[in-house]
Image (cartoon, grey):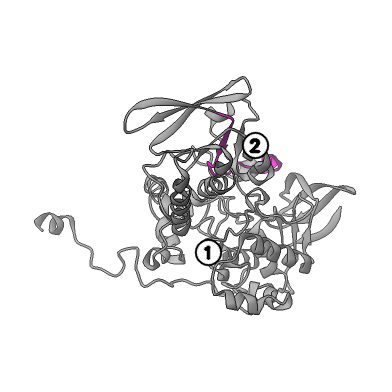
Amino acid sequence: MDNQPYDFIAIGLGPFNLSLACLSEPLEDVKSLFLEQRSEFDWHPGMMLEGVTLQTPFMSDLVTMADPTSQYSFLNYAKLNNRLYPFYIRESFFLLRREYNLYCQWVCSQLSNVNFEQTVTHVEFCPQSESYTVSCNTPNGMQHYVTRHIVLGTGPAPYIPDCAVQSNSNNVMHSSDFCHRLDELKAAKRVTVVGAGQSAAEIYHTLLQQAVPQGLQLDWIARSPRYFPLEYTKLTLEMTSPEYVDYFYNLKTEQRDWLNQNQKNLFKGINGDLINDIFDTLYAQSLDGPISTTFKTNSKLTSTQKVGKRLLTEFYHQELEQPFSIETDFLICATGFKYQRPAFLNNIAHQLPQDEQGRYLVSREYAVDSEQKRVFVQNAEQHTHGFVTPDLGMACYRNSIILREILGYSPYQVEQKIAFQNFDLSDVTLSTQQQSSAA
């Protein structure tokens, strides 16, 4: 056992915990350790499509919004790798997705507090020392670490609807595996994409360009009323702010749940340029005659059934109130991700209360262990903190708060107000019920 007590151990290494690693590395009074089960950092390899960009500006890198002078910034990476001038000439705020992945891999190579091939098996709490023992399976056998705090960054898992899982078929896949099976998909006769977000649009566009001209029948089915663009106007972007998180957090649970269902175009919409590119591709292909493609909105997947080597998919059109079916070779579920509490937390599950829907009761400061503030979470708090939860641009803000709570001081400035708008009613005069009725 490694008896060195860490101030915190972070489990899982996606962009959010990697950001935390960068921000904690320069702090001389902090002992931190980051554990990742994979052999290297690789961000969404199954969706690493050529030419695809992030939907947040390059300032939403791992450190800039907390410390613009950090050696781990994207601009420093670009400078040290002789890419700063080409990036400047390119004149785009939005990094290529592959470029962002390479940047994160470079950062990992610079850090001393990151350990790969560490599969956490269980976590135990010792009341006497008020510390946790984190046990890991490593290439060198079991390893045990002692820490005062834990930061959970395992992230959400690919979600496939139950009605698609029921077929138990290799014909059903999640969008996160798209690149790994692209050759197989291009050789098929028919592919059906389900979903209305960015991933669904990227997959549809890729197959439209690369496979439809060769004879593929391509369907794009969405449950939403239409293919909504991501809203990217500046007053809306102000909602990606500390004060909107405050506002959202203080709403009633029912209101928060309603907002999360009705704000999807703020975080699950499609890049407007991509929507236009899809139309332009369709327009160009139509010069050669009808295109082998089908669009359907307002349509919910209800069942799947294996039929020989193919798949029978059943849908229900919610406005026409009419079922319909498609027999396809592959069903691609671009249906997002869903958080599941890791099994290694079972021994301390009683410390991590959940609501009736199985969601963490997350504090404003991102703690999930009631009032103790020993266990913190990354990207599992959308139900309490709003649609900004998975936004890369809010990583530094969240990590600055987590570090403040763990250390008892603020190593990085935590902004309180950045928006021109007030989302609450603190800047207006509240009316009494009688005055409202009289008006």
Name the mark nearer the viewer: 1 or 2.
2
Residue 337 colored in magenta in the image: yes
- Quadrant of residue 307 within the rendered picture: top right
Q: Which residues are magenta?
A: 328-348
Q: Is residue 178 left or right of residue 257?
A: right
Instruction: Write down the residue under mark 1.
Output: 56
Q: Which image quadrant for residue 67? A: bottom right
Q: Mark 1 belongs to which amino acid?
A: Thr
The residue wearing badge 2 is 187
First of labels 1, 2 by sequence position? 1
Q: Is residue 135 above or below residue 242?
A: above
- List x then y, in percent, for residue 166: 58, 25
Q: Is residue 90 above or below residue 314?
A: below
Look at the image and tell me whether residue 215 can be seen.
yes
- Element on which disc 1 rests: loop
User: 197 or 38: which is nearer to us?
Assistant: 197
Q: Report x, y in % for residue 334.
A: 54, 42
Magenta-span inclusion, residue 43: no
* 271 sits to left or right of 52: left
Q: CA distance from mark 1 to mark 2?
A: 34 Å
Q: Nearer the viewer, residue 76 or 72?
A: 76
Tell me if mark 1 has few (under 14), some (14-19) or many (20+) residues whose alpha carbon lies within 10 angstroms of its own: some
Type of amino acid under label 2:
Ala
